[in-house]
Image (cartoon, rainbow, N blue to C red):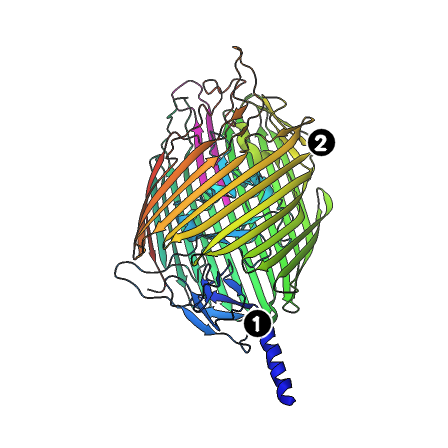
Amino acid sequence: MKKYIALLLVFMATGSYAQQLVTGTVFDTEGERVIGASVTWKNSTIGTTTDIDGKFEIKPHKGSKELTVSFIGYEPVTLAINSQTKLPLDIKLKPGIELKEVQVTGRKMGLVQNRAGVLNSQTISSTELLRAACCNLGESFETNPSVDVSYSDAATGAKQIKLLGLSGTYVQMLTENIPNFRGAASPYGLGYIPGPWMQSIQVSKGTSSVKNGYEAITGQINVEYKKPKTADIVSANLYGNSMGRFEANADASVLLNKNLSTMVFAHYENETDEQDDNHDGFSDSPSMKQYNLQNRWEYHKGNYMLHAGIKGLSEKRASGQMHDMDNPYRIGINTDRVELFAKNAFILNPEKNRSIALMLSGSVHNQDSYFGRKLYDVNQNNGYASLLFETDFTSKHNLSTGLSLNYDSYDQSYRLTHNINQSKTDDFIKEAVSGAYAQYTYKPSDKWTFMAGLRGDYSSQYGFFVTPRAHIKYNMNEYVNLRASAGKGYRAPHVLAENNFLLASSRSVNIADNLDQEEAWNYGASASFYLPIAGKTLNINTEYYYTDFTKQVVTDMDSDPHAVSFYNLNGESYAKNFQIEASYPFFKGFTLTAAYRMTDAKTTYNGILKEKPLTGKYKGLITASYQTPLKIWQFDTTLQLNGGGRMPTPYTNEDGSLSWDKRYKGFPQLSAQITRFFRFGSIYLGAENLTGFTQKNPIIDASNPYGNNFDSTMIWGPVQHGAKYYLGVRFNLPKDI
């Protein structure tokens, strides 16, 4: 009898093990988490890949008890898995063997979908950034179907992000999970982060975690810089293009001792040649000179960690009429900016993931600018502090709580007309927001994850408000993940600071009194499929998001074609966004990605619900990448199909013609790049806009910029004439040579 009972207990234990997911994290020798590592059951096609945190989860396989973890350029690891195996696993990969000329470091996945987390997010790795030779943050999304980056006007060079069919002001921008590039920094801030400085970019869609605040309405974009401890000893990048732009980037890291390391970044950008290929008398793009420096420190000892740094930037932009004349229309934007940050973390209990962290940051942003004889000067100061506590009660229950304080001040001085006899208006605005939050994550089984967050904040300008957010994830099986989310977001509008590029037109600027704090609900659902086909995995992600504004500051360029008005929403305003994306490695070294997106965004303008102007109705994207077997050559190409949309209401000229068409048509854009790798670097050659498409006459009435009809803000397509060619060289000296 005892024997049967023992056998029964063994059977039950085995059955219990069979139902338990095998989980773990994959690291390299430097302790960095490996994204996209392959995890498979030996002698089977059943497998998965590590997510953006290097984590994985996989169901047991009846035919195998050995788990193989591999990544190109690293030695594979095989582990025996049984009922006695302690989970989760911590797996360290060692570098592989070097070939003669090329160091095999592997080709990391460029775009990684978050498979394990409850949020619908993607990570753009440094590998993906190299595919388009990105020069700064604004040029990092050419191969990404979710994020659009376009010029705000044809004169200043300001760029804006669009996510889920809405402007980038509704996206919370973060650097290493600290809110950044708000207010006056938003029109030109996409150019403040050089591409070679970035380690990765995380794009989270829809409502996000309450940890980082209340401002994310359509999503978050978080930039991670290179870290002193793991970065190359020295790296450099030189870039030049056919438009007269030259860039030089360099960084160096030093391990001072086993606990302390530091790193210095340097960036120089010079684009002094003004060109007028469409012969309208205006420069096609501004001349620009930028100096950008950053120093970072990293300290680890015991259970204490510190990341701190300082960053300084100086930038000068100049544009406008190029030809000699008595009274030329010129634009000048001079910016000086300083950022500081310190992130402190104390690990209280590693087994419980119990920790406390204090994040501090501050910035000073000074901009002096003129648009003809219009003036806009601003000195913006920001201070931010966040205290966070997090713990696991059990493997199923996690709690995060925290306090935050944010302070913004805008000291503005402006003249919104060309009348030099009119005195400037001085305006000082400040807002202090203190808040507290709690976020609870419950994982009752391997299939379900629930996350709910609630924060309350008090604004010195808008009073008390509450931000609820919730997320659900369901693992239907190892091939299908389902997610849903709902939550609220808020933001304080700063009309002139965020939209000063609109001064590059003759439109009068009308700002209503007592503008509301903007408020919107966001609802989302997504399904991710990981389908094994011919020994490889077909990744498909489909999603739908709906953003509904209850309060909004409307930017109205329709009611009066010679004015732009800002007033509180009176009616409906929403955006619906559907997207499907698929990626498949057809053969070794070659990956093809295709995506399609539809957008329906409408707002009530002066009592009439209309399609949002200058917003494409659809977008198609196809990217192809091939790397030769020895990793010596890489070929990348991207085709964008940008959909048409509505223009702001035009006016009628004296001859009866319209100032511009009521709608614009879709257009294609093609880019390509060839890279030759060497042991300590690479050379790359590429071209953008090979289709040569350019928006005709992007500046309205360019011959009379001081007249009533001048407007450089009616932009929906490329403004620089023809294709742009570029050449660059990279050098890096890794720590493990």
Give x and y (percent) for residue 250: 37, 51
Which residue sits at x=38%, y=26%? 276
Res. 549 image quadrant:
top right
Disc number lying in front (1 or 2): 1
- Whole-angstrom CA distance, mark 1 to mark 2, is 58 Å
Name the outermost residue toward the left: 100
**Residue 331 lies in magenta, yes or no?**
yes
Q: In the rendered view, tell whether residue 282 sits above or below residue 255.
A: above
Q: Amino acid at mark 1?
A: Ala
Give the labeled residue for mark 2: 570
Q: Is residue 162 visible?
A: yes
Position of 733 relative to 423 (above/below): below
The residue pinned by badge 1 equals 18
The residue lying toward the viewer, choosing from 638 and 54, is: 638
What is the secondary structure assignment of the residue under circle 2?
loop
Q: Quadrant of the N terminus?
A: bottom right
Counting from the top left corner in percent of width and height, residue 417 is at: 57, 23
Residue 369 coordinates in the image, percent (x, y): 51, 32
Q: Residues within 10 Å of mark 1 (few under 14, many from 20)?
A: some
Residue depicted at 55% across the width and 43% down the height: 579
Q: Residue at x 56, y 59 (%)?
A: 116
Label 2: how many residues lie within 10 Å, few (<14), some (14-19) or many (20+)?
A: some
Instruction: Please tell me which of labels 1 and 2 falls first in the chain.
Output: 1
Residue 275 within the segment the image draws in magenta: no
* Residue 140 position by quadrant: top left
